[in-house]
Amino acid sequence: MKLKNIIIALVFVTISLLMACSVEKNTSSSRAYHNLVLKYNIYFNANEAYKRGINRINSSNTDNYNEILPVFVESKEDLASSATGEMDKVIQKASKGIKIHSITKKPDMSGKNVSKKDKEFYDKKEFNKWVDDCYLIMGKAYFIKRDYLQARYNFEFIPRQFPDLDTRHHANLYLVRTFSESKNYKEAKETLDFIEAQKDLPKKLEGEFSAVYADYYIKQKKYEEAVPKLNKAVQRTKKKSLKYRYAYILAQIYENQGNLAKASELYGQVAKKSRTYEMEFNARINEAKCYVGQSKNTRDIRKKLNKMLRDDKNIEYRDQIYYTIAELDQRAGHTKEAKKNYRLSSEVSVSNDYQKAISCMKLGEIYFKENDYKNAQIYYDTCMAFLPTTYDKYREIRVTSNNLNELVQYTDELELQDSLQALAKMSEKDRNKIIDDIIAEVVKQEQLEREQAQQDQINSMIFDQQRGNAMNRVNAPSGGGWYFYNPAQLSFGKNEFTKKWGNRKNEDHWRRRNKSVMDFADDEDDEELADGEEPKKNRIANNKSREYYLQDIPLTDSAMSMSHELIQEALLNMGRVYKDRFHDYVKAIEAYEELNKRYANNQYLLVSYYNLYLLNKLTKNSAQEQKYKDLVIQKFPETNYAKLLLNPNFVAELEQKRRQDEDLYIQVYDDFMAGKFAKVNSVATEFINENPDNVLKANFDFMRVLTVGRTKEQDVFKNALVVFMQNYADHELSEAARNILEYYGTTDVDGLIADLQSRPAEDYTQSELERDSVEVSKPKEQFVYNDAEEHYYVIMLNPASLDVKRLSFEIRNFNIFNFSMRTFNVVNTTYDANTELITVRSFKNQRQSVNYSKMIANSEDVFSKLANVQYKVFVISIENFNKLQKQKNINDYMLFYNENYK
């Protein structure tokens, strides 16, 4: 005990003596003290926080094995938030360690005989051995937070400041990753080439270097180039979890390239050695797929897959097993079996939304190829409900799904109106009998639902193996309309609906997560309607009364006439979608011919004739092609369609007119930029009067509105913008008009519209616009772009709207924390009576000021103060700042700024 107490006392005395050491002194004792404290206190705690953050990322990660895995888990953007708190601690501790324990003062060597070794030591920039590690871990923390600008600063600083230390190798590897994550592939490749050229990379880092190189290629989808790098990463990586992750990715790439033998071999190795069952399972599934690709004999594979289905630990993976079996069926040409197993895969999928989406997509593709568009729509629609937006072919699938949704909207309308008309033609007795049967079925289904709600949840997962069509389209009766009902089909559909979606309330938009703005079912007195919805008076909501169903049947002449119009529109649009979206010319011809067969003098006769002419030309039916060409010319001789058929140059003439109009618009734009506002107004007005249906009408009219902004008061300009928005509500320039109103401080644009609508209209195209443009004053001095000149960072605001002193304080705090080695002045200056400028001064050049602007934009402390305040942020050269203060032309500068700095 005495010896122990003596040791403790000695340690205490030693530490007390060392505490007197200052970073301003560079002696052996001060170096020892600061090394000790930085290593075992500050850096240790920072490193522990970093490890905790990485562990959180790994525990939060769920890999999607249906896509090529990311080389590094940290690449997943959605995982960064799980480690943010720990990474903030890392940054705080590392920066504190550097600030307190960095020793840059040279040691005193006066009076000593300096050796070569001593001189090398004297020439060092940093004398604390752990400062470089602090910079590295701080850069890694910024990298994990996806703050790539700050991460880059750290990783570039380390090799410059510590060129002889091993941390430079780690910094260079993370610098490559930083460039790759921010899609700066040019600089990533330059850094990779630099690392290779140095030829001094430690052997222990060769595996990581190869993985970083592979990641660089994979992010660009250059999979062929990634293969040799991944091979090296697998060979040279010692950590088992990383080694098999790289091997799995390599197998995925081989599979995508069609090299199934190598893929199967690698999947097999991973399945045997992987430490996680999830990776093992997926490796075995993919091994089976690749094996099938090599051999026609799939009997053994099917046995293994069926055995896996029976294994309790694979319950949550049954969707993937059924999917793999379906893939075998499809490759073997057994489409019926493939459908069944894809459907089973979708039905048993509990938590794997991705697998449900892919299984439904496969079903949709099969039905689409069979031209069964109704079933294709069902599965594509379900696919889109679960498919992540990051999926490679997401846009393509979305387009197909939207097209199918549009088509089925028309086919459903046709079926609905045919059903309703058939009911209308029945005797009252027969009609009521059908309605009574439907009501009886509704009552029966509600009873079944009540019984099913009492069952255990697991029973809802049991499905009938003999039902080959488990996901038939179900449209429950609603206020909007109903179909010819088949009670047996309704019963089946109800059960399948409940199995898939659970017991849902009978309401519109049942699949919406947020019904707060859509659900009016429980409030019959609520008269609010969705945009564009026609008011429906006295709608009957009780679906167990005859009146509920009778209200949609066209029993009057006007209702029957409206029903016929809906059928005509549906057939016309069906033909258009078949022709233009799906290129199914046979079905398109059927739709147009059915339209003309049912309604010989329909309002769409010209359009249908011309489309039938084109379709028969495409299908090389010359007799029908000539027939419909003659019909267009004979019945509609004055139309563009007839002119096109008679004049082979008609399209070319139209194209020439279009080019002339575009050239005129360019000239009008140039005149506007030159300040020739009267000419702009005159030419634009003449064009609009002569071309009332021209596609460029809105563009010319918008130029007229802009001339108002340059020649009249702001209120008049606002009025002109509102009129434009009303006249061209669906045009993209309407949004531009709204943006201009908001730019001028009008946040309640809709309120302004309502206000101005009550005022008398003003002809803003005449009066003062007729004056010569030379009367419009222009700035004498123009702003000049000089990226090498010193710049300021500026926040422009109304000082009455917030505590400016507090904001200035937060900016200073930001500068102190992030730029402790730099001196930035924060200066408040007056711009005009209602505006103040907060400037951060100064930056060596444009690049530095822009980088600062990007960094401070992420500061919550600074910009939270501006949350409800109108303000402008920009960087500006000193010369331009002086001009701005003199001329007070902020709008001109913002145009200049957006053109040159954004």
Image: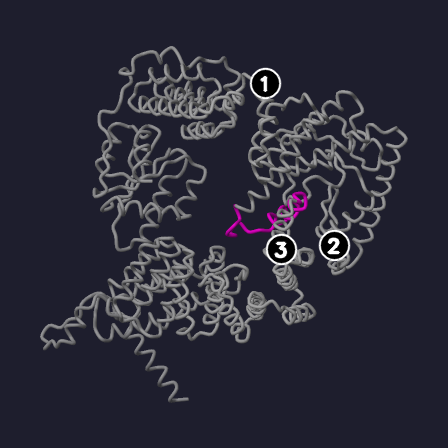
Residue 349 seen: no
Q: Amino acid at mark 3?
A: Ser
From the image, give the main secondary structure of the stretch colored magenta: helix
Q: Quadrant of residue 238?
A: bottom left
Sequence order check: which comes first, mark 3 or mark 1? 3
- Specify few, some or many for label 2: CA neighbours under 10 Å numbering under 14, 14-19, or 20 or more: some
> For this rendering, which residue is in front, 650 or 554?
650
Residue 771 lies, with reference to residue 46, above or below; the image says above
> For this rendering, which residue is in front, 387 or 20?
387
Residue 628 lies, with reference to residue 335, above or below; the image says above
Label 1, secondary structure: give it.
helix
Q: Is residue 572 left or right of residue 212?
A: right
Cα distance in 3D space between marks 1 and 2? 52 Å
Cα distance in 3D space between marks 3 and 1? 52 Å
Which residue is labeled 1 in the image? 634
> For this rendering, which residue is in front, 134 or 432?
432
Magenta stretch: give its range.
Answer: 372-395
Which residue is labeled 2 in the image? 468
The answer to whether marks 1 and 2 mark residues whose Cβ atoms lie closer than 8 Å is no
Residue 482 lies, with reference to residue 271, above or below; the image says above
Label 2, secondary structure: give it.
loop
Residue 568: image x %, image y %?
68, 27
- Would you say residue 98 sits in the magenta stretch? no
Which residue is labeled 3 in the image? 359
- Specify few, some or many for label 1: CA neighbours under 10 Å numbering under 14, 14-19, or 20 or more: few
Residue 544: image x %, image y %?
84, 37
- Would you say residue 383 sits in the magenta stretch? yes
Label 3, secondary structure: give it.
helix
